[in-house]
Image (cartoon, rainbow, N blue to C red):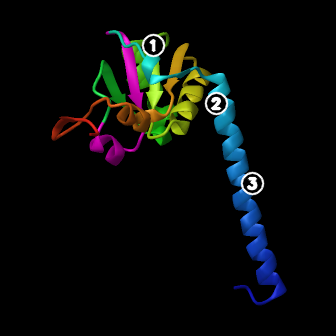
């Protein structure tokens, strides 16, 4: 508990900064969600030219990924730096790309950045891999393929 007025003001200031950051982040995610098509799992169609892009961190990816079509992993924090080399040069900037993360927000933010980088056919899996698992679909990792029962 802060004792001095200065400490109290510092505490209130940091709480305000956190609130504003959360507010700004929330607005950014809402902007991305309105800018990027959000695909429900029941409407998901994957063909041999679709790239399913997992933007989670490597340790998250290793816990399990969606095992359909072409699966590529680029962590959200490295996306802008790797998109040309790993996506555009290999699949083209018009490739159908569906991003996903754990719950959805990072996927939407990643998809919005891809659009800004010139990719034309980008969408996000609504609800991320958690929604995928909760809908009874399987995921895969180094141990094999499994689903929530």
CA–CA distance between discs 2 and 3?
18 Å
Number of the label disc, if any, that sits on residue 61: none
Q: Where residue 147 sits: x, y (%)?
A: 26, 36
User: Residue 83: in sight, yes or no?
Assistant: yes
- The residue under label 3 is 20
Q: Is residue 130 left or right of residue 109?
A: left
Q: Is residue 135 left or right of residue 11?
A: left
Mark found first going from the N terminus, 1 or 3 = 3
Considering only vertical position in the picture, is 94 above or below 29? above
Asked if labels 2 and 1 touch by Cβ distance under 8 angstroms, the answer is no
- The residue under label 2 is 32
Q: Residues within 10 Å of mark 1 (few under 14, many from 20)?
A: many
Residue at disc 2, secondary structure: helix
- The residue under label 1 is 96
Residue at disc 1, secondary structure: strand
Considering only vertical position in the picture, is 80 above or below 36? below
Q: Which residues are magenta?
A: 48-64
From the viewer's side, name the closer residue of 70 and 117: 70
């Amino acid at each position: 508990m802060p004792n001095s007025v200065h400490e109290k003001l510092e505490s209130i200031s940091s709480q305000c900064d956190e609130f504003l950051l959360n507010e700004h982040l929330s607005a950014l995610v809402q902007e991305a969600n309105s800018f990027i098509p959000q695909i429900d799992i029941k409407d998901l169609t994957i063909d041999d030219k679709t790239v399913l892009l997992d933007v989670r961190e490597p340790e998250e990816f290793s816990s399990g990924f969606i095992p359909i079509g072409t699966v590529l992993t680029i962590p959200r924090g490295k996306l802008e730096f790797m998109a040309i080399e790993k996506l555009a040069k290999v699949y083209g900037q018009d490739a159908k790309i569906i991003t996903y993360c754990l719950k959805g927000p990072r996927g939407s933010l990643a998809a919005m950045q891809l659009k800004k980088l010139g990719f034309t056919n980008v969408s996000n899996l609504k609800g991320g891999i958690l929604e995928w698992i909760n809908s009874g679909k399987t995921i895969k990792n180094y141990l094999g393929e499994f689903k929530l029962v």
